């Protein structure tokens, strides 16, 4: 329990599947890096309910390449509970992006549970309105159907998506 004295948030964890990272994710990372001295982008090893298109190594590599301009951002991964990773990392806060009101419903329960498990608060950044409809799953679906996704993902990610399609004949 916090004793009421001001706490300095020094280490934020930004968790996600990042399958793949989008410009919406990158916007949240850039804004978090301007607020918190250290930001760890934490890639969940096995996203819930689906197998990822990109391997853990690929997702981490894409994120490292996209965030190389931010000296206070690092990329890591975790298995199991986010709350355990937060505790192990000695982090002060979890950061999440909120795109639309429906995101909030799930996120509120996650935030309560993570706080109950690790005593760490979740802080939300409103996604830039330019990315309010952008999600990793929509990006994969549009790309699969031949749509142009260049505006919504970093160039590095586009390159990985092209390579994935060439290697597998599909994504
Ligand atoms: O990018 P996503 O898929 O929306 O990220 C979801 C993620 C990884 C943040 C969430 O599924 C998560 O925290 N998974 C770890 C397992 C866990 O801690 N579950 C309980 C959440 S209260």
Image (cartoon, grey):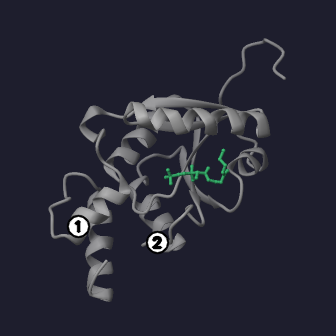
Q: Is residue 89 left or right of residue 108?
A: right
Q: Is residue 164 left or right of residue 65?
A: left
Classify residue 118 by image quadrant. Answer: top right
Residue drawn at (26%, 61%) of the image: 155
Q: Position of residue 162 (x, y in %)?
A: 25, 75
Classify residue 167 by image quadrant. Answer: bottom left
The 10 Å Cα crowd at callout 2, few under 14, some 14 to 19, many 20 or more, is some
SS class, disc 1: helix
The 10 Å Cα crowd at callout 1, few under 14, some 14 to 19, many 20 or more, is some
Q: How far apart are the two marked residues, 2 and 1, measured between alpha carbons?
A: 18 Å
- Which residue is under mark 2? 58
**N-term mark: 2 or 1:** 2
SS class, disc 2: helix
Q: Position of residue 140 (x, y in %)?
A: 31, 65
For the question of whether residue 33 can be seen, the reply is no
From this view, report whether residue 86 is shown above or below residue 61.
Answer: above
- Which residue is under mark 1? 143
Say which of 111 and 131 sits in front.
111
Q: Position of residue 28 (x, y in %)?
A: 42, 39
From this view, report whether residue 57 is shown above or below residue 167.
Answer: above
């Amino acid at each position: 329990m916090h004793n009421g004295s001001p706490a300095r948030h020094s280490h934020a964890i930004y968790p996600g599947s990042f399958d793949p990272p989008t410009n919406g994710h990158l916007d949240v990372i850039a804004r978090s890096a301007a607020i918190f001295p250290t930001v760890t982008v934490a890639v969940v090893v096995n996203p819930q309910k689906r197998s990822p298109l990109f391997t853990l190594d690929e997702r981490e590599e894409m994120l490292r390449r996209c965030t190389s301009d931010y000296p206070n951002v690092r990329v890591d991964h975790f298995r199991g509970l986010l709350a355990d990773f937060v505790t192990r990392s000695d982090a002060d806060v979890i950061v999440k992006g909120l795109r639309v009101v429906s995101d909030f419903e799930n996120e509120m329960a996650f935030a309560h549970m993570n706080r109950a498990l690790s005593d760490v608060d979740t802080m939300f950044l409103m996604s830039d309105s330019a990315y309010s409809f952008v999600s990793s799953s929509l990006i994969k679906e549009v790309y699969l159907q031949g749509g142009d996704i260049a505006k919504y993902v970093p160039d590095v990610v586009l390159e990985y998506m092209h390579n994935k399609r060439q290697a597998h004949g599909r994504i």
